[in-house]
Amino acid sequence: MCPQMCPQLCPQMLKEDARYLEKRDAALALCRAKSDRTRKLVASQKSLYTTNSTARVIISNRKLYPGYNPFAPIDKKKLKELADWLKSCPKRYDANPQHFRSERMCFLDHLFAQQWRFNFKDFKDLKPDHNGLGRRLPGGAWNYYAGTIPSFCQSNKVWGTDIDDIYAPVNFVDSHWIAMWISIPKRNIVVFDSICSSISPEELDVVIEPFLYMVPYLLVECASSDELRAQYSLEPFTYERPTNIPPARAGDCGVYTLKYIECHALGIEFSKKDFAKANGKSMRDKMAVDIFQELPDAHEFENKDMDDILGTYDG
């Protein structure tokens, strides 16, 4: 560079450096201000039901240095508290069996029906042995039979020996729900359908067929003795779909399915007044409140969580 130009460039370069430093300091000051200010949740992090407890732990407005360790050893005391809480979590049947019409019943989840329907082809395709056995049952069939699943509603009772009535929701092509009551003593299945026009008789035959054949087969296959096995038969169950039950509006079939199961298990008739179509929303709200109340002291824990900064998230 020409020496004669240095006196002209140096002041200009010094000014540019000064402007750069000034902008840098302003940017750093803004970053510090953003870091130090009270942080708030965006709309997607807010919930009417969780009181934002999870998000408040993540955004606690406290500086945690050197930082949270996601691989820190588990607090064994808290782990035991969790295990004790799970053991004491009330289930309506376990807490009040006297309210139900019988102690010989169990409730299954929708995965039971989904899995059994999916695996029915494998069951049919395998040729049985000379005793009519040797077919392949769906995975977990023994666990359902022994009452160890679903894990959230274990009966720990054996079908046929301790259980007469089995209730389960069934989904049809991801668009409609029906309730299924399997009566082992009657060798019959009753389908409670709130919108019968959603499934034709021919379609319903296909939906229910797996249970007509695999439930009696399971009772024979899993019987603990020859004497007990002799009480059952491999002949398929029968089924029916009553048409005189109160119908639902489109979109309420899931709620009605659960209410059919609940009322039938309690021995309560399907009243047209209680099951009026206009009551769909109130039935849904009642169910949500019941579920919330059966989480022991959950609302109490939520209300106490980070109360000192609770107002921060109201804006």
Image (cartoon, grey):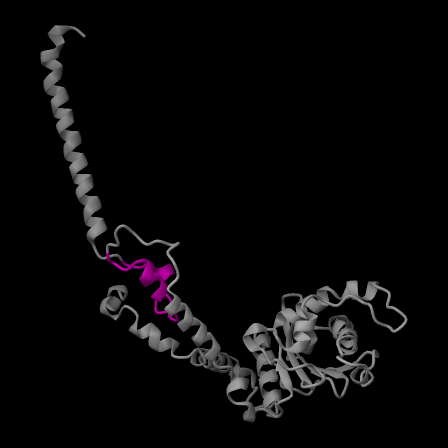
Q: Where is residue 216 in the image (x, y as percent from the top left)?
A: 78, 78
Residue at the image position 60 percent from the left and 81 percent from the top: 155
In the rendered structure, the answer to whether residue 147 lies left or right of residue 31 reads right
In this rendering, is residue 247 above or below 21?
below
Looking at the image, which is closer to me, 158 or 47? 158
Where residue 295 appears, as percent x and y from the top left, is 44, 77
Q: Answer left or right for 40 relative to 216.
A: left
Residue in view at x 34 percent, y 69 percent: 51
**As drawn, is 48 to the left or to the right of 264?**
left
Residue 73 can be seen in this image? yes
Q: Main secondary structure of the magenta part?
A: loop
Which image quadrant for residue 12? top left
Numbered marks: total: 0
Q: Which is nearer the eye, 237 or 123?
A: 123
Can residue 84 be found in the magenta stretch? no
Range shown magenta: 40-62
The spot of residue 235 in percent (x, y) is 84, 79
User: Residue at point 19% right, 46% down?
Assistant: 32
Residue 160 picture location, percent across and down: 72, 84
Nearer to me, 13 or 137: 137
Front-lying residue, 157 or 118: 157
The answer to which quarter of the image holds residue 267 is bottom right
Q: Is residue 171 visible?
A: no
Can you say which quadrant of the picture contains the C terminus? Answer: bottom left
**Which residue does the image show at 59% across and 88% down from the upper left?**
263
In the image, residue 47 lies in the stretch drawn in magenta: yes
User: Which part of the image, by quadrant, shows the N terminus?
Assistant: top left
Q: Where, by quadrant of the figure, is residue 138 drawn? A: bottom right
